[in-house]
Amino acid sequence: MAVLEVEGLKKNYGQLQALKGISFKVDQGEIFGLIGPNGAGKTTTLRIIATLLTPSAGRVTFLGFDLKKNPEKFREKISYLPEEAGAYRNMRGQDYLEFMAKFYASNQEEIKEYVSRGQQISDLGVRLKDKVGTYSKGMTRKLLLGRALMTKPALAILDEPTSGLDVINSLEVRETIKSFVKEGISVLLSSHNMLEVEFLSDRVALIDRGQILDAGTPQELKEKYQAPNLEIVFKSSVRSGL
Amino acid sequence: MKNFGHLLVKEIKELVNKQLIISLAMMILIFSFIGNVTKKEIKKAVAKQKIAVLDLDQSELSRNLIGTLNMANFIIEEQGGEKEEVIQKLRQSDLGLLVVVPPGFSQEVANFKPVEVETYSYLRGISISGTRTSEVVKTLLNTTNDFLSNQYLKKRLPDINPAEIKSPIKNREFIIVKDRMAEGSSAAVIGTLYTQSYLLPIILMMIIMYSSQMVITAIAMEKQNKTLETLLTVPISRQAIAMAKMLAAGLIGLLSAAIYLYGFQMAFSFPTDELSSVTGGLAPILKQLGLTIDTQGYVLFGLSLFLAILCALSIATVLGVLAEDYRTAQSLNIPLVFLILVPYFISLFADINTMSLPAKILVLAIPFSHPFFAMQNMMFGHMGMFWLGLVYNFIFVTVMLIWTARIFATDRVLTMKLKWGKKKVVL
């Protein structure tokens, strides 16, 4: 069952056509990856679904709700991790999780539950008692991932989730995302690291210059383009002019 | 509503940071220090002061003059010897004034010839007490002159009142405000009104400046710290986000202004008994002229101020959206500060009603101008101007709030930027 459906999505910035009518679906409990180079339209797509930008044309529905008519329903059930996100520097890590949890929780117990899950996912231990301003980039990213996943959203939108992380931290984050999906949550992620997307995603869409070139499971695409990995798949799909 | 309250608390906590607390505490300390020093100087000026007197005449009249000085709040330290020696000697002492009664003083007075009483002021710094001493002595000499001249006139013209010769023209002063009239000194009335209202423009300026700066900074910091995108995707309306920022800035601005005002009053308040003696006699005149503000007037003034603050906050919110970081926010705040300073200075040094029409329109087009002139308009019966200002600000605020809400509800909150290089606003 599809939780998210995107049909003919277009976005113009003045004369510039950032999205030229893209369509895809994300099923429940699925990790769907958008891969493409910088400027392909990945972040614009994610920002529209996260209700940050309004589409110029097309239709986005999430759990049956239309984005244009019910953006607040999207905000209740989705969680968005921007590529270059930060947290409030004067807050302690733990307070930041609590602050964000309060927007989604309906009672104190739920707040505690969310914060506890956020602590677990971020895996920052005692450093959660320190102010965010003292964190390294990697620690902030882990805190933000904890914030994005702690409320168990119906759809987590992760833009370059391992951006700025070292190898070890990147591996840990990928494992966290994988295990999280086992609980029935859907993930829409973007990355220009195609190997990362190949490892994480159940299905991927290749996006370039505001258009989806092809979509399918990593295995299907590799077979179709007779390529050893998604990087070669992407290169071949661009060459074939799809 | 729950989420709004939650966000408001966060916004207030973000604004009440260490820097703000330290700067406010420092301000209180500085004002308190200035206040203590000023009050000590005033006390010194009011207290009995020591002056030196060199009587080179040693007559009954000169002794009377010294006696009068003694009764007039001075402690007299009589000197003896040559004038030059005494002048030289006092340079080493802490005495601030020397009065020299010349030889032949009483003889010259008896012959109706002008006499010179010399005063030597020793300036050892600039202080209130230093200036006051010579002023009091001058007043005293004037009084003595008056007394002596009255005596001469009585001797020569015993049937005529000396005061009638010296001041043949009497003046009865009347003040008219619109359709009301009262007898009294216009200078005293204006002076009292000015004294009573000198703090008002300062408070207004501070509240508006603080609030606008805080809201610009709050939004710019969200952008600089990359927290705005996340905040915009949480389940709370965009309008509520903008309102929470404005309300928090307004509240902290109000608090900061109150603290500044408290400090300011501590430093520059006049002794209450002196002030009440000045205003007490004029109170019936002010009431008769309708130059007092009743409860309804204060409510209307509060409304005018509230609308002006909302104007400032809504403009500042849009400027905050244009700013990409803290530094840009500070630059964008400068034109707003100038707009606030224009009515501030005009309210202190000029009369809006006597300005040329284009200048008047320009000043009144600034929404912050109206509360600066609201009290004056109400007191002098320019209610048309007052209501016009209120309606203008209401329309201004409504348009700005709708615009702000629309900016926050659309992509513009993320895409609107001021491009300095190209000198244009990208919407």
Image (cartoon, rainbow, N blue to C red):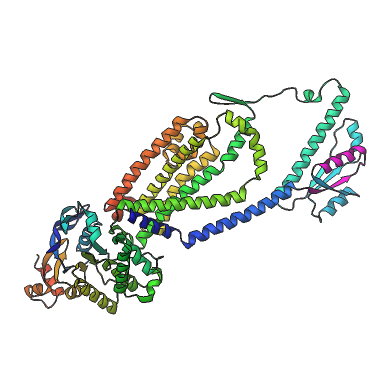
Q: Is residue A138 magenta?
A: no
Looking at the image, which is closer to me, B78 or A142? A142
The answer to if B49 sits in the magenta stretch is yes
x and y percentages locating residue A125 in the rendered image: 36, 76
Magenta residues, start to end: B48-72
> Is residue B84 shown above or below A180?
above
Residue occupying image coordinates x 42% and y 36%: B390
Residue shown at 20% from the left, 60% from the top? A45
Front residue of A79/A221: it is A79
Q: Position of residue B184 (x, y in %)?
A: 64, 28
| Residue B228 image position (x, y, % from top left) | 32, 59
Specify whether residue B399 is in view. Answer: yes
Q: Is residue B127 visible?
A: no
- Tally the numbered discs: 0
Where is residue B48? Give x, y as percent: 78, 47
Direction top: furthest residue: B159
Q: Is residue B109 above or below residue A122?
A: above
| Front-most of residues A12 and A124 | A124
Residue A163 lies left or right of residue B347; in this view the side is left
Kindly identify the residue that appears in the image at 56 percent across and 56 percent down.
B27
Figure quadrant of residue A66: bottom left
- The quarter of the displayed image where residue B271 is located: top right
Would residue B126 appear left or right of B229 to someone viewing this image?
right
